[in-house]
Image: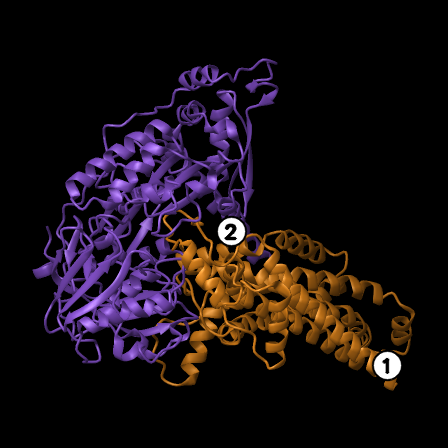
Chain colours: A purple, B orange
Amino acid sequence: MEKKKLLVLFSVFLTVLALMTAGCIGQDSAKAGTLAEETLAENTAEGSQHADVVYLSGGDYGYPQPFTIYPRGPGSSKVGMIFDSLVERDEIGIIPWLAESWEVSPDGTEYTFQLREGIVWSDGAPFTAGDVKFTFDYEQKNVPVSGGIESGVVDNVRVVDSGTVKFVLSQPVSTFLYKLTGFKIIPEHIYENVPDPVSFLDPEAVTGTGPFLLDEYNKEHGSYRFVTNDNFWGPDTAVKSVEFVPVSDSLIAFEQEEIDFTGISPDILDRFTSDPDVRVVQQPAFWGYQFYFNMKKCPELNDRRIRQAFAYAVDRDELVEKIARGAGKAGKMGILSEDHIWYNPDQPEYGYDPEKAGALLDEAGWTDTDGDGIRDKNGEKLAYVLSLGSGEVRIGELIKERLSEAGIDVQVRALESKSRDANLKNGDFELLISGFGGWGKDADYLRTRYCDTGSQTGSVSSGAAVYGYHNDTLNALAAQELQELDDGKRKEIVYEMQTVLADDVPAIPLYYTTNYDAWRISKYDGWMNMYDHHARTHSILSYLERDGIAEKR
Amino acid sequence: MGEDRNSFIFRLLLTLFVILAINFFLPRMMPGDPFSTTSADEVGEEIIVMTEEQRLYYMNYYGLDRPLHEQFLVYMKNLMTGDLGRSIYYKMPVSDVIMLHLPWTMLIVVGATVISTVSGVVLGTFSAKNRKKGSDRIMMTGLIAFAEIPSFLLGLILLLVFSVYLRLFPLAGAITPFADYNGPAEQAWDILYHAFLPVVTLSLSQLTGVYLLTRNTLITVITKDYIRTARAKGLGEKTVWNRHALRNALLPVVTRTGFMIGIMMGGVVLVESVFSYPGIGMTLRSAVVGRDYPLIQGILLVIAVSILICNLLVDKIYGKLDPRVVI
């Protein structure tokens, strides 16, 4: 009896296993080829602009107040559902939010904000200029996980009257308004009595002025339920309640209608593009991989011709094709991605061109004198160790292959993510790959990443000073850009910075990902992208009626 | 006897101290620190890259900028008062984090241990009785082949078959999110319903070991003289097998069960991540990834202590099963 049962059970498993592996392989190889060329047919159906509940993929990202979210994952967007900032971002730019209007002094050091009238905290207490000043002062002592304003930017904040607040800057900072979009105002009447906000997990901790209230948070299961804040001052919520529920695989959960929004990989696109109820849209290219040169450790990399040779030798289109399965855009040497609002389309281009790479290396004096396929100069070989995270090995292998064709020898060294980060921070690498988001943010990151001037607005641990890049022209432009208050003029400077960067290749953006989002339009179709961010579910405007202050522009 | 007892306690304390020291220093020897993350682990993942200023603030906040020996002394001192410290990542006391997640792991580990041990012994006995017959051979080959499937793959298969295609079981989690239960019975049912696949996966991955051990020990035992004696006394086959053979064969199985808890803690990480089960394994993994030193220490300590307790328990049970063993 037992024997029979066991046999049946076992053979069932074997069959299932065989079937599934066969199925997977079949699907993969059949589709991979056609994917890249295939353009998405747009789903023109009308979707629902309102929903009682929207279900999203959950996971524990911390208690949603500015001091207790986790540094990994979308914690700050959950803070944004409860807490407001003075200004907000829509699909085009910065819009007024808690502040109705503002004035900037001619020298750019004083910002006076007129606050909207009649705003109350979710517990009924009125919101005043005092809360804004309090938040700034409080965060000087207690640094929030995200959205804090780094020291050296603001000298002090003054309450002019209960509806007016003035920020006095130490010097003009062109990105100040942009920084304020992440600066979430916390209630003075609650936090004034909290000496250590990092351990403040009481229900009052999530008292905000924003459109939602935290109705339930379960840390162990990673679920959140946000419901409409009836005291909210702004546009009505289009989604009455948002529930983040734990899923093991967001795609399966989406197919089983447990969640209404998911990211999908290019390999299974077909399954959804034919579904009239599903809208599939690509994300803007704001998440990418950067390839670092360590010019401190490898002095020959200070020769820009060698770095340019790398840019010609690495086939970035191939990476998009083979690794991102077409869902990406090849890196631009001007650093900003094509989807960035200030992308300069007129910059030096580096197509895949091994011959040009070879010519540049010849010119720099690196030739293969001993015929082993690796270039050398004065007895030294052009050979490097490429450090990367264990998830990026395939990228590394493809790059290794292309570079070896140009006569550059590369050993791929896969590290655990934190070890790689530690090496990057300490400058303990030769070449390195790291992936991160935020490529859509204010172009000022061209300064923080590639300028080695010790500026007072905070240093980045993975910045140019670490890997030994120095460019006087870029530094000078960056200093201008940081002080230029006229957007038009600033944009011109940023364009010029891109040209300089593209010419000099201090690092190579390999590719920016453009993953696919899919959602069920009959459930809710109001998803939008902020102009600087890739994830639609992170934008607070995605959950609001697009009228009044939040009107679609 | 008194001296023995003293030396036993001394050895226990020494073991504990060594464990504590390793738990403390090992995580800190890993490259990086909790605040210097600059890269995301997967495409599209968001991370908050801290400025150097923020990093230094937090290093100071958690006392990580003090010399290591000082930190160790503080840790030991706090431990004496039962304070495991504060999790850097989760921003709450380590003991709270552990208490939230450990019960879930206990549930599936204990469940899996019971199921795999009982069914392993039953199947092993069956196999030993039918030694060299077809059924024994098929079962043995089948189970050995089965044991070669890694537990996460097995979990994935079960998930695909029973949750995705047949939709019999939930896809993830340990409870239905935001559920309103009508009484504890419904809640218990919901918990068991969610625990079922993880427990089965973990049981199946342990089953073969128990099965083989039982079968092989029984086969050795059954040839012993005392079995022949028992049979010669005219005892029934049932009594011979159950009272004489099995009882002796169970000794190594019990030992193995004790060790298994420790081994399973490794496997449980993978199983929990396949089923998004909120156990301690997943928590440990994220603690290591995030270099959350206090939490790593706390979880490793709990695991180490539970293995020590299991070993003590095994010794006790051993004494009951085999009166010759004196503890």
Amino acid at the residue labelled 1? Asp
Mark 1 packing: few (<14 Cα in 10 Å), some, or many (20+)?
A: few
Give the numbered dot on residue A222.
none
Locate residue B297 relative to residue A146 in the image: left or right.
right
Locate residue A218 relative to residue B115 in the image: left or right.
left
Can residue A6 be seen in the rendering of this structure?
no
Q: Are marks 2 and 1 on the same chain?
A: no
**Does residue A258 lie above or below B175 as drawn?**
above
- Which SS class for mark 2? helix
Quarter of the image with the N terminus of chain A in it: bottom right
Q: Nearer the viewer, residue A185 or B249?
A: A185
Residue assigned mark 1: B4
Q: Position of residue A470 (x, y in %)?
A: 41, 35
Outermost residue on the left side: it is A548
Q: Position of residue B267 (x, y in %)?
A: 59, 60
Locate residue B316 relative to residue B65 in the image: left or right.
right
Labels 2 & 1 near each other (Cβ < 8 A): no
Which mark lies nearer to you, 2 or 1?
Answer: 2
Mark 2 packing: few (<14 Cα in 10 Å), some, or many (20+)?
A: many
Amino acid at the residue labelled 2? Lys
Q: Nearer the viewer, residue A484 or B296?
A: A484
Q: Position of residue A353 (x, y in %)?
A: 39, 20
Q: Position of residue A363 (x, y in %)?
A: 45, 15
Number of numbered discs overlaid on the protein picture: 2
Identified at 22% across, 80% down, the residue is A123
Q: CA distance from mark 2 to mark 1?
A: 47 Å
Residue assigned mark 2: A418
**Quarter-wise, where is residue A203 in the image?**
bottom left
- Which SS class for mark 1? helix
**Does residue B45 lie above or below A60 as drawn?**
above
For mark 1, name the chain.
B
